[in-house]
Image: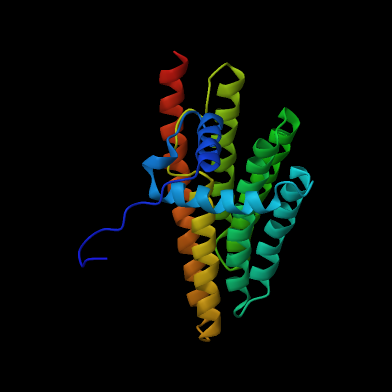
């Protein structure tokens, strides 16, 4: 390849394109190609889903596995030293499983309303467990609780709007699942690095507090954004 020439973007295969279209429909028409992060994430999920397809694995099992992996996040964070690094890896793994369960259900045509309910419940548990990990690392409980409450309010407002007849998710805010996972993963991961280099407990506590503060700010901004969008859409 000539110097300075950009490599052309990889084109998704036909079945991957269908999977992205299904994802877009399930997320209120959001175009996955508009973000390199979403497109790349969906490519990873699609590949893992393709490996699991045809193995007769119920998507609910994957949902349950993701919830168990999420439970490991605060447990590993509590272990101290370098273990929060493993907690960060578990946060990312749980997020991947969260994407695979729905994709597998759509792939095999087994998607159901009950499955979506279970998936949402598992997601909310995962959100709270990741915030609990920051609290166990030293972040003020009040900050983590505030982020958790605002996150639940955001999802409650979205669910109420959909029950009122709103199609889709209303708006893509700065505090969606990827953002929550990124904040938790970076927070726990940096605390793990600090533990490995024998940093003081104050340093670990400061990192966890910074991550929790970011979670509060992003969740509040996300809730405000969503409420404004929902008001316009439901008028």
Q: Position of residue 113 (x, y in %)?
A: 72, 28
Image quadrant holding the C terminus, namely: top left
Q: Position of residue 62 (x, y in %)?
A: 73, 50
> Who's the residue at 62% across and 67% down the image?
87
* 138 up-or-down from 10: above or below: below
> Of residues 88 and 152, which is closer to you in this image?
88
Of 204 and 47, which appears nearest the observer? 47
Choose between 172 and 147: the one closer to the eye: 172
* Relative vertical location of residue 208 with respect to residue 99 in this rendering, above or below: below
Let me know if residue 120 appears in the view. no
Residue projecting furthest to the top: 235
Q: Is residue 112 visible?
A: yes
Q: Residue at x 46, y 28 (%)?
A: 227
Counting from the top left corner in percent of width and height, residue 140 is at 55, 60
Q: Is residue 227 above or below residue 181?
A: above
Q: Quadrant of residue 117?
A: top right
Give the colouring mode of the picture.
rainbow
Query: In the rendered view of the protein, which quadrant contains the N terminus?
Result: bottom left
Residue 131: percent from left, percent from top: 59, 56
- The residue furthest left is 4
Q: How many marks?
A: 0
Front-most of residues 85 and 66: 66
| Residue name at image x 75 percent, y 31 percent | 114
Task: Identify the residue at the far bottom of this view.
Answer: 198
Residue 80 placement: quadrant: bottom right
């Amino acid at each position: 390849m000539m110097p300075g020439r950009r490599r052309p973007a990889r084109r998704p295969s036909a079945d991957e394109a269908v999977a992205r279209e299904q994802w877009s429909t399930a997320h209120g028409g959001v175009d996955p190609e508009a973000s390199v992060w979403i497109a790349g994430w969906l490519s990873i999920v699609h590949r893992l889903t393709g490996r699991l397809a045809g193995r007769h694995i119920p998507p609910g099992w994957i949902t349950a596995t993701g919830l168990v992996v999420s439970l490991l996040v605060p447990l590993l964070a509590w272990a101290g030293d370098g273990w929060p690094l493993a907690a960060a890896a578990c946060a990312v793994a749980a997020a991947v499983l969260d994407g695979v369960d729905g994709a597998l259900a759509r792939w095999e045509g087994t998607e159901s309303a009950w499955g979506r309910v279970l998936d949402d419940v598992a997601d909310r548990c995962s959100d709270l467990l990741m915030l609990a990990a920051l609290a166990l690392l030293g972040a003020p409980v009040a900050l983590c609780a505030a982020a958790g409450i605002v996150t639940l309010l955001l999802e409650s407002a979205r669910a109420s709007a959909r029950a009122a007849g709103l199609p889709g998710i209303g708006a893509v805010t700065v505090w969606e699942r990827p953002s929550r996972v990124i904040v938790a993963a970076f927070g726990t991961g940096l605390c793990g690095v600090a533990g490995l280099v024998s940093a003081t407990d104050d340093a670990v506590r400061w990192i966890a507090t910074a991550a929790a503060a970011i979670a509060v700010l992003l969740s509040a901004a996300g809730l405000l954004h969503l409420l404004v969008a929902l008001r316009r859409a439901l008028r």
